[in-house]
Amino acid sequence: MIFKDQLNRAIRLSTSPKRIISLVPSQTELLIDLGLKERLVGITKFCVHPKNLKDDIAVVGGTKNVHYDKIEALQPDLIICNKEENTLEMVQVLEEIGPVWVSDITDIEESLDMIERLGDLLDVKDKALGLVAMITSEKNAFEQFVKTRSLKKVAYLIWKKPYMAAGKDTFIHSLLGLNRFENIVSETRYPEVSVEQLSMADLILLSTEPFPFKETDVSELKNIVNTEVQIVDGEYFSWYGSRLQNAFAYFKTLHE
């Protein structure tokens, strides 16, 4: 059987994978929600959902650095990666160990496409389509809710010292748009931003990940820029798997 990943690479499999390693935390959570925990043999140290998953499944490293010897010893018949979270060099080495499927996601549509493709590849198509339908329904209802809200100019910070923000061509940017938040950062990816740039925003959002912003950071930034500052759950803005089914209810609370 031949499957295509989101980089349009052909993945050849003789049977549906039974020994899967996931190097993407949000996609690990997705696999669990698709009922595939028993097939997972390896995850990263950042795969924190569901809780205590690392007690049951081998940890093979982080998202940027893995222990190739541990991965090889687990004899995977599928390794799941992501273009942004994992490196090209990793993928090239991992392909010497087993088939590697890579996702590439910058918006909701690509996320839903990823869920459908993995559902097909892992022989859980009906569950995947059900999840896609649920997320789509929640998204449509939220768009109706938020369409009358005023646009706000927003900066979404992911790092401190230096301050770094989510820019264009990111999944976070697309979710900001769904919330009628106009991203003031014009650069792509995750550029460093100045205090002068931040002062142009009506609202500054401090993500809980990858940098764990706290309330002390809110107070500190408010003393520097004369604008509203708020901490937000970074997983709902950056995890593009099954977590989306609850993301829109969370976004609603931000507006209420």
Image: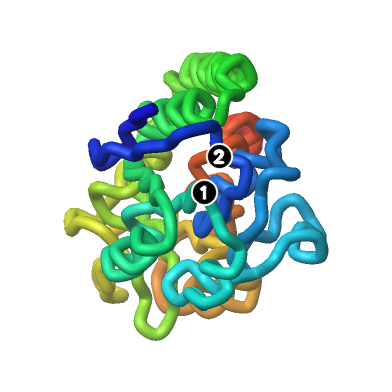
Looking at the image, do the residues carrying marks 1 and 2 touch, with CB atoms under 8 Å apart?
yes
Residue 24 horizontal/vertical position (percent) = 51, 55
**Residue 177 lies in quadrant:** top left
Element type where label 1 sits in the image: loop
Work out how far the residue at label 1 is from the one at label 2, CA to CA, in angstroms.
6 Å
What residue would you read off at disc 2? 17
Going by the numbered disc 2, the residue's amino acid type is: Pro
Q: Residue at image x 75%, y 51%?
A: 50
Q: Residue at image x 57%, y 35%?
A: 244
Element type where label 2 sits in the image: loop
Going by the numbered disc 1, the residue's amino acid type is: Asp
Which quarter of the rendered picture does the N terminus lie within? Answer: top left
206 lies left or right of 183? right
Q: Residue at image x 74%, y 44%?
A: 38
- Compared to residue 146, the image places residue 111 above or below, namely below
Q: Residue furthest front?
A: 14
In the foreground, 185 or 117:
117
Label 2, residues with CA under 10 Å away: few <14, some 14-19, many ≥20? some
Residue 234 appears in view: no
- Compared to residue 241, the image places residue 170 above or below, namely below
What residue would you read off at disc 1? 77
- Compared to residue 192, the image places residue 13 above or below, namely above
Which quarter of the rendered picture does the C terminus lie within? Answer: top right
12 lies left or right of 25? left
